[in-house]
Amino acid sequence: MPIKIPDNLPAAKILAGENIFVMDEKRAMSQDIRPLQIGILNLMPNKIATETQLSRLLGNTPLQVEVELIQVSNHKAKNVSEEHMLKFYKTFSEIKDRKFDGFIITGAPVEKMDYTEVNYWDELCEIMEWTKTNVHSTFHICWGAQAALYYHYGIEKRLLPEKLSGVYSHRVVHKNPMLLRGFDDEFFVPHSRHTTVDIEDVKKHPEIKILAVSDKAGLYAAATDEGRQIFITGHSEYDKNTLSDEYFRDKAAGMNPHIPENYFPDDDVTREPVVKWRSHANLIYSNWLNYFVYQNTPYDITAIK
């Protein structure tokens, strides 16, 4: 089934070239079906790349999905035109009276800052509080997951000795978690972050179930009992070259970054990275949409509470 995203969004052309069925607004109006309403609060610096990555995963399921892109109001995007933001994004004030079947809060490059130093922290807190009554299931990514664990449960993030960057082995630790149904005994996920959440801190909150971990990257997936809140510390959505682009960007800026681990063959940055996380990326988003959104959300979306 198709994903409905705004007409002329750059992701539409890219996804169509990958044989992912993108439905334009005119055709969507003629469909006698209620698509799943998915909001994406995009806090990542490269807006267009993140739009494309998440739309690709949301569109690769049998479910019809309609995406609403959302921005914080008091932060100006630096890596995309103002025209793009005005054309394709809404502010929280424009959507706060709506209900959503699912909602994604992305990561953001602000993890070294105290939460209260982030210039949109107050608005983000308002959004996270709003999701508790207006969203059936919220999917938090990387810093978005850390921020949510702090806001909802008071769990602090911890600064790592050096940036965690690479593709790491993970294992499922919770018995038969629906979110990770079909996962292999070992699976791989990209990570790119300076901070972490200590597993022992999460264990102090029995309402949060730890689903998957990594010996090197630590906590990967956790969720509340009914999946209303899902916390993912890695970047399953990353493209093949995302870690490469980050590495060369930081190197050009004189930051002397470490080569991403388990990414370039033989750590040779001149060689093409090998993708080994794509199938599990598709599976986790498919499972989320199916088991935590589609099968549980009320048909009358206004009944979400």
Image (tube, rainbow, N blue to C red):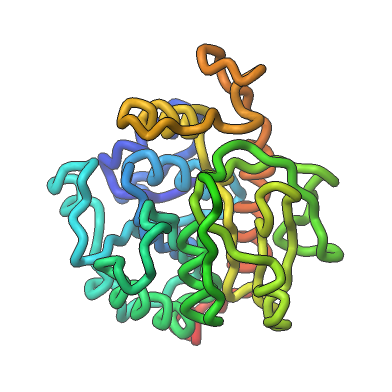
Measured along the vertical axis of the image, is residue 5 above or below residue 116?
A: above
Where in the figure is residue 280, as x and y percent of width and height? Answer: 68, 43
Measured along the vertical axis of the image, is residue 149 above or below residue 180?
A: below
Instruction: Name which residue lies at 29% across and 77% down.
Output: 122
Where in the figure is residue 297, as x and y percent of width and height? Answer: 57, 75
Q: Is residue 82 left or right of residue 121?
A: left
Instruction: Name which residue lies at 51% across and 81% down.
Output: 152
Report the number of discs. 0
Observer-nearest of 138 and 19? 138
Measured along the vertical axis of the image, is residue 211 above or below residue 134?
A: above
Instruction: Name which residue lies at 38% across and 39% down.
Output: 49
Q: Is residue 71 left or right of residue 16?
A: left
Going by the picture, which residue comes out furthest to the left? Answer: 83
Going by the picture, which residue comes out furthest to the top? Answer: 270
Where in the figure is residue 10, as x and y percent of width and height? Answer: 30, 36
Measured along the vertical axis of the image, is residue 150 above or below residue 109?
A: below
Whether residue 205 appears in this view of the structure is yes
Q: Quadrant of residue 268?
A: top right
Observer-nearest of 243 and 27? 243
Observer-nearest of 139 and 269? 269
Where in the figure is residue 102, as x and y percent of width and height? Answer: 50, 67
Whether residue 33 appears in this view of the structure is no
Q: Quadrant of residue 299?
A: bottom right
Going by the picture, which residue comes out furthest to the front? Answer: 161
Instruction: Name which residue lies at 44% across and 57% down.
Output: 106
